[in-house]
Image: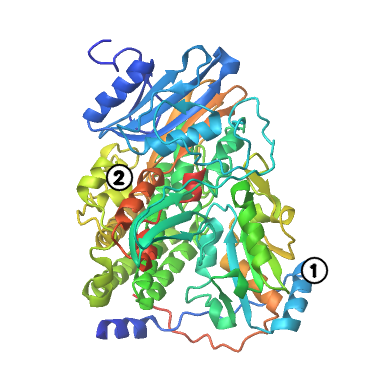
């Protein structure tokens, strides 16, 4: 092997950020991942493709996020093999990603947890639905087996099983607590309940329609995922996005961030016993989404983005309304922040609850909002800026407390910065078209879209097929990285604090389950 | 405490008059008659996300904000299916949630009704049917009425719910203070 396993065949990847692809063999797959980790990379995601109809092999891909670029390792499994080297010892997030890849494609990492992750018995264990020989609408009878949770033994230890149907209006997931009295010794998550076979659904879909499905990978991050999909397709087709369209997309993305943070701050206050907070913040959020309805025709901006731009341009009257709203929100959020900060009862619940230390966060590759509350200064909008963030840099938000209080502070800071960005975008909206045509995409090309949504970086890896169709589309939500961290953050806390701690992370179920 | 009270006073009452239904919808009206005969306005709902993208959930949450004030109209969400009259189901039914949805439905006492909310739950939406998705809620448990939309707006949800409880046009003054800045 050469000194640098990543030098040979270093290919440019069309993307909205700097991205390269390196074709590697099994040894280089490991060595490359190790080398990139030493350079500060985190594993963003893993996926596999069934290319047996093309050249007789399966392929696995690893997307690694460096401070200034994305590197995709591409490894063709030789001779029809279905095994590849595991990356879990380098990047903990790989473990669940590898389990998911086995459930869907039958490619097995050579080490790590072998329990099913997305397959709950809804399809037979010898059927791998992402393989090309499984029909697009094929379905199976359910044969569920009990899931082997890791048992905790000892004097007085008992289990509490929660979910998948929860007491409130929450997405489905299962939490298994091992407790003594009220104290949590161990939490184990089981996810996958909202798995809808998105990748299979994307398969052979017309490229011009895929953004509608991408918009529904995770409903609270619809702008982020639509933008990631559109960015991947526009990069592959070398479509130059008009700056006005980019600015409008950024406006939508920042409004999505503000709306979700407002909702979370209200719920967090409520979970800490301050119903006033829920009333106030949910009212502000309602005002925001109502203005979305007036300006963009959609409260939650579903389908506002489409390949080549956005659906509706913004008129002078709406710009004026939004600027007024920015001023109103700055004032209202500041005054509510002071109330939260000064409220002894709320702070007593927030502080030291659900602690995720910076060391643990770093070791486990925490990303996005959760990472920024535990001392990890990563934000793709700042580190790998794409238009319009190249000329409008967001402020870096960073806290290192790692508890619920720190995640609350990050949300407050990010709302204020997003409001600043919105004002700037509205005041300097470039002239020009808000939508341009997207040409037919060449077949067999891989493109990436990486967008820093409100939870963290979302990724779409899009491979094109003939006739302007999707060959393969892999979507990744940052919740994959951060879900395992709640298991750590819960240790030593009491069961009644779980809703508060879970809400402070507010991770996606549908976005994760795919 | 003073700042909280000052803020509450300044915010005022945001709740809006309840919408009246102008849409004629036969299954909803039948559900309304059935429900009204049993419960009047005291309706309790259990929500199950059977595989939704989380879009419908955002709008169901919005029903509880001061603008829509769902509980003010005598409708409340409950934590257990055993306390519920209506099962509100979102999402195309994922195979991984099929059993949980069935069990939730079976845990509800009779009489009970099912309201399918959102395009996915009504007609599979963008997701279709495949190895992971059963599709329409009606293909898994009996559905009495539906609310369309992707996601349906809170007003559409409220109309659907109020129609089944037969809410009369309320006498609410609209002089609430709404300015904030």
Picture disc at residue B26: 1
- SS class of the residue under badge 1? helix
The chain letter under disc 1 is: B
Mark 1–mark 2 distance (CA, rounded to whole Å): 51 Å
Find residue B127 and report its horizontal and vertical position in percent.
Answer: 63, 44
Q: Nearer the viewer, residue B56 or A435?
A: B56
Find residue A404 and report its horizontal and vertical position in percent.
Answer: 28, 61
Sort mark 2 into few (<14), some (14-19) or many (20+) by Cα contacts within 10 Å.
Answer: many
The colour mode here is: rainbow
The chain letter under disc 2 is: A
Q: Tell which tag, 1 or 2, sits nearer the viewer.
A: 2
- Name the image quarter holding residue A460: top left
- SS class of the residue under badge 2? loop
Picture disc at residue A366: 2
Picture disc at residue A290: none
Left or right of residue A409, residue A107 in this image: right
Q: Nearer the viewer, residue B162 or B144?
A: B144
The residue at the point 50 percent across, 68 percent down is B62
Image quarter where the N terminus of chain A lies is top left
Residue A238 shows up from this direction:
no
Instruction: In the rendered view, tell whether residue B155 sits above or below residue A481.
Output: below
Left or right of residue A359, residue A389 in this image: right
Find residue B15 and report its horizontal and vertical position in percent.
Answer: 50, 80
Instruction: In the rendered view, tell whether residue A19 sits above or below residue A487.
Output: above
- Name the image quarter holding residue A285: bottom left
Left or right of residue A56, residue B14 in this image: left
Whether callout 1 and callout 2 share a subunit is answered no
Sort mark 1 into few (<14), some (14-19) or many (20+) by Cα contacts within 10 Å.
Answer: few
Left or right of residue B65, residue A250 in this image: left
């Amino acid at each position: 092997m050469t000194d640098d396993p990543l030098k040979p065949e270093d290919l440019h990847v069309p993307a909205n950020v700097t991205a390269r692809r390196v074709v590697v063999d099994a040894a280089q797959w490991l060595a490359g991942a190790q080398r990139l980790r030493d350079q500060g990379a985190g594993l963003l995601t893993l996926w596999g493709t069934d290319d047996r109809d093309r050249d007789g092999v399966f392929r696995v891909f690893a997307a690694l996020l460096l401070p200034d670029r994305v590197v995709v390792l591409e490894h063709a499994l030789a001779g029809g093999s279905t095994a590849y080297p595991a990356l879990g010892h380098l990047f903990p997030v790989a473990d669940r990603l590898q389990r998911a890849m086995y459930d869907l494609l039958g490619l097995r990492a050579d080490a790590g947890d072998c329990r099913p992750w997305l397959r709950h018995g809804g399809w037979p264990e010898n059927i791998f639905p992402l393989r090309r020989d499984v029909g697009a609408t094929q379905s199976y009878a359910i044969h569920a087996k009990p899931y082997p949770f890791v048992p905790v033994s000892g004097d007085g230890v008992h289990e509490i099983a929660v979910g998948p149907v929860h007491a409130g209006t929450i997405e489905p997931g299962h939490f298994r607590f091992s407790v003594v009295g009220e104290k949590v010794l161990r939490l184990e998550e089981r996810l996958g309940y909202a798995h809808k076979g998105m990748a299979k659904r994307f398969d052979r879909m017309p490229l011009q329609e895929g953004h509608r499905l991408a918009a529904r990978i995770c409903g609270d991050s619809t702008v982020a995922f639509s933008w990631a999909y559109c960015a991947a397709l526009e990069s592959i087709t070398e479509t130059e996005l008009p700056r006005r369209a980019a600015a409008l997309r950024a406006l939508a993305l920042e409004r999505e961030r503000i709306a979700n943070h407002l909702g979370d701050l209200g719920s967090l206050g409520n979970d800490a016993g301050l119903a006033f907070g829920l009333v106030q913040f949910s009212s502000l959020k309602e005002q925001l989404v109502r203005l979305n309805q007036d300006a963009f025709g959609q409260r939650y901006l579903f389908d506002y983005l489409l390949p080549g731009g956005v659906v509706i341009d913004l008129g002078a009257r709406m710009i004026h309304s939004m600027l007024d709203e920015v001023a109103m929100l700055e004032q209202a959020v500041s005054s509510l922040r002071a109330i939260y900060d000064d409220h002894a009862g709320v702070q007593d619940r927030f502080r030291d609850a659900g602690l995720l230390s910076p060391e643990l966060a770093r070791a486990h590759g925490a990303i996005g909002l959760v990472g920024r509350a535990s001392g990890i200064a990563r934000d793709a909008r700042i580190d790998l800026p794409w238009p319009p963030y190249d000329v409008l840099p967001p402020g870096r938000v960073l806290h290192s407390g790692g508890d619920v209080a720190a995640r609350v502070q990050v949300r407050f800071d990010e709302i204020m910065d997003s409001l600043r960005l919105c004002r700037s975008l509205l005041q300097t909206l470039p002239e020009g078209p808000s939508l341009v045509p997207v040409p037919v995409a060449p077949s067999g090309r891989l493109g990436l879209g990486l967008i820093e949504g409100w939870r963290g970086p979302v990724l779409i890896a899009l491979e094109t097929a003939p006739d302007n169709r999707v060959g393969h589309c892999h979507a990744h939500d940052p919740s994959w990285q951060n879900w395992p961290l709640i298991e750590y953050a819960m240790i030593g806390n009491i069961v009644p604090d779980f809703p508060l701690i879970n809400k402070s992370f507010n991770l996606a179920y549908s976005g994760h389950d795919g | 405490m003073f700042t909280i009270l000052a803020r509450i006073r300044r915010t005022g009452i945001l709740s809006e008059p309840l919408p009246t239904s102008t849409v004629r919808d036969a299954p909803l009206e039948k559900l309304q008659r059935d429900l009204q005969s049993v419960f009047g306005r005291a309706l309790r709902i259990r929500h199950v996300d059977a595989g939704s993208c989380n879009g419908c959930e955002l709008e169901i949450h919005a029903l509880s904000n001061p603008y829509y004030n769902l509980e003010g109209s005598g409708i409340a969400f409950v934590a257990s299916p055993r306390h519920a009259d209506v099962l509100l189901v979102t999402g195309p039914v994922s195979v991984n949630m099929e059993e949980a949805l069935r069990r939730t439905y079976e845990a509800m006492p009779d009489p009970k009704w099912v309201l399918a909310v959102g395009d996915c739950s009504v007609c599979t939406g963008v997701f279709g049917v495949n190895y992971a998705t059963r599709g329409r809620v009606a293909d898994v448990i009996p559905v009495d009425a539906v609310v369309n939309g992707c996601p349906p707006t809170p007003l559409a949800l409220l109309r659907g719910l109020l129609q089944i409880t037969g809410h009369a046009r309320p006498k609410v003054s609209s002089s609430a203070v709404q300015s904030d800045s």
